[in-house]
Image (tube, rainbow, N blue to C red):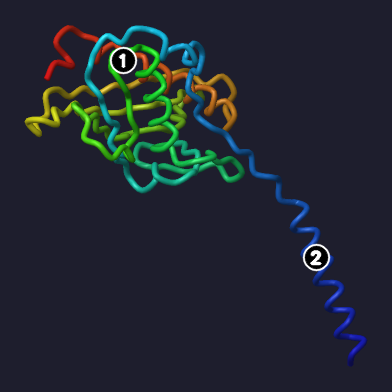
Amino acid sequence: MKNNFYIIFVLFCLLAGCVAQSVPPVDIYTISPEWADTIAQGEREKKSLFIIQLAPMHATRALKGTEILYTDTQYGWNSYAYSRWNDAPVQLLQMVFQVAMEKNDLFKAVVPPTYVSEADLLLESTLLDLSHHIKDDETSEGVVRVRFYLINNTTKTVTSTKEFISRVTVVTQNAQGAVKALNKAAANVARDLVAWLAEPGRIET
């Protein structure tokens, strides 16, 4: 009886090992800011005396996880089984936007949500989409869509709102191709955000 139990135990371990070996490793990706030329920014003259704070980004539950999402139906979202973001998109995008705003020198400082003193301006945002859209004709694109709200902290009023969307063609129809396109789309939205904030009269309080 003991011998039978031992044989069953060994077979179970061998089967478990085979199953574990057949599962591919998970690929981890990120959305990276464009860091170039940010080191010397403190040496350049600022264009404004205002401090702007980034509020925590709002999003649906799906966009607060680390799954890399794709959609191939009108109302369906799925995720790549063996690919993940290294952090939630709402966290990764905030870093992208903060770096882009700092590089432009529009503000005296661009501070994160954890900043304790009151800033002059508050930038709230809602992430509406960050996913790989697969079309019926087998082409696809990475889509990033964000709505921003610029708030005057003195009057506690919304002074301006703007929605940006960027669609970038996915070259290889897999998670790696989607990540590359989504990084480019995020950079496009960051560029458009800075251009919007730089419009005359936009950041006056």
Question: Dot 1, crowdedness within 10 Å: few (<14), some or many (≥20)?
Answer: some
As helix, strand or loop, the secondary structure at mark 2 comes to helix
Residue at which label 1 appears: 194
Question: Dot 2, crowdedness within 10 Å: few (<14), some or many (≥20)?
Answer: few
Quarter that holds the N terminus:
bottom right
Can residue 1 be seen at all in this image of the molecule? yes
Residue 198, percent from left and from top? 25, 10
From the viewer's perspective, is 28 left or right of 112?
A: right
As helix, strand or loop, the secondary structure at mark 1 comes to helix
Residue at which label 2 appears: 15
Viewer-side residue, 22 vs 126 = 126
Can residue 57 be seen at all in this image of the molecule? no
The quarter holding residue 95 reads: top left
Question: Marks 1 and 2, how far apart in space?
Answer: 55 Å
Q: Are marks 1 and 2 in contact (CB under 8 Å)?
A: no
From the viewer's perspective, is 173 left or right of 90?
A: right
Residue 53, percent from left and from top? 27, 30
The residue lying at 84 percent from left, 79 percent from top is 8
> Which callout, 1 or 2, points at the residue further toward the start of the chain?
2
Residue type, numbered disc 2: Leu
The residue lying at 25 percent from left, 14 percent from top is 196
The quarter holding residue 193 reads: top left
The residue lying at 49 percent from left, 11 percent from top is 37
Residue sticking out furthest to the right: 3
